[in-house]
Image: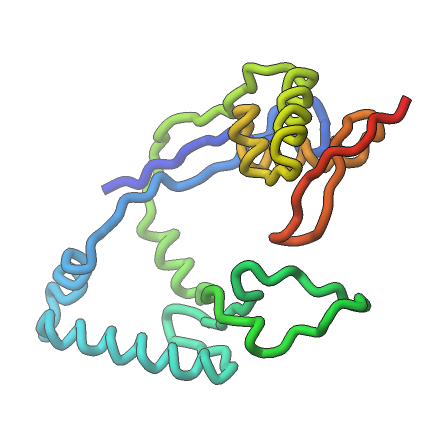
Amino acid sequence: MKAKYIKREMPDLRNTGQTQVCYRLQTLLMEGEDFVRKAVRNTTLGESEFVMALGLLADELACHLAQGYAVSVPGLGIFTARIGLVKDVETEQLDGDEPKRNARSLEVKGVNFRADRGLVRNIRGCCQLERGGTVRIRQPRLSLEQRIAKAQAFLDRYQVMRVGDYARLTGLSRTAASLELRRLDDSPSSGIASSGSGSGKVYIRKKTVG
C-alpha cells in the first residue's frame, strides 16, 4: 500500500510575498488489534504473548521516565518525559517578584521521542509515496479593519479576549490569529493590548493614540 502525501500552504510569516509550502503524510489509523495481528505473522509468537511484551515495555518505560531517565529502546529510539505547569498556573518569570513555583505546580505533560536512525532508514526503504492533494490556507472574509472592529466590540463587551476568541470572530486559524494579535499589540493605533504571558496571556482594550 502506498502512502499519500499532502502539499499544504503555509502562512507567510516573514512577509516575503511568496507562497510557502510544506509536505505532510496523510495518515490512517491502524487499530491495536490489527497491528498485533500483522506484527506476529510469520513468527512463532502468539498474539497474547506479543501484547504482554508490549505491556511490559510500556510499564518499564513509564517507571524509568518518571525517575528522570532518558530510555533508549533498541530499534525504536530514545524516550524522555516532558514536564510543564499544571493547568491554570501562570508562567513564572526568571527574575520576577511573584511567588516561586514548587513541585506541585508541575506535572508530566507528555513524552518526547527521538527515532533511532535505523528505524528511519527502514521506514524510508519501505515507503512508496504518491500525491494525495493540496490544502490551501483559508482566506479571511473580513478585511483587517473589519477584524479590528470586531475585536474592539468584543472587548468593549467582555473586557478580555483570548486567541481562540479572535480566531472565531475573524475566521482566521489560531496560528494566524495569534500572529495578527501580536502585531496589533505592537500597533499604538489598534486599541488592543496584551496582558499576562504564556498560557495566561489575554488581550484587553487600550486607548487609541492619535
User: Along the horizontal axis of the image, is 186 left or right of 5?
Assistant: right
Q: Depth check: 92 or 129 in front?
A: 92
29 in relation to 18, above or below = below
Q: Quadrant of residue 175?
A: top right
User: Along the horizontal axis of the image, is 163 left or right of 52?
Assistant: right
Q: Residue furthest right?
A: 210
Q: Residue at x 79, y 33 (%)?
A: 206
Please give the count of numbered marks on the rendered protein.
0
Give coordinates of residue 84: x percent, y percent.
56, 66
Q: Depth check: 117 or 61 in front?
A: 61
User: Along the horizontal axis of the image, is 140 left or right of 32?
Assistant: right
Q: Depth check: 175 or 131 in front?
A: 175
Give coordinates of residue 153: x percent, y percent.
65, 24
How are the colours assigned in the image? rainbow
User: Along the horizontal axis of the image, is 6 left or right of 92?
Assistant: left
Give coordinates of residue 129: x percent, y percent.
35, 39
42 in relation to 207, above or below = below
Tell me if I can see residue 113 in this picture: no
Looking at the rendering, in which quadrant would you find the N terminus? top left
Q: Residue at x 47, y 37 (%)?
A: 23
Q: Residue at x 35, y 30 (%)?
A: 132
Q: Residue at x 65, y 53 (%)?
A: 198
Give coordinates of residue 75: x percent, y percent.
37, 71
Tell me if I can see residue 102 in this picture: yes
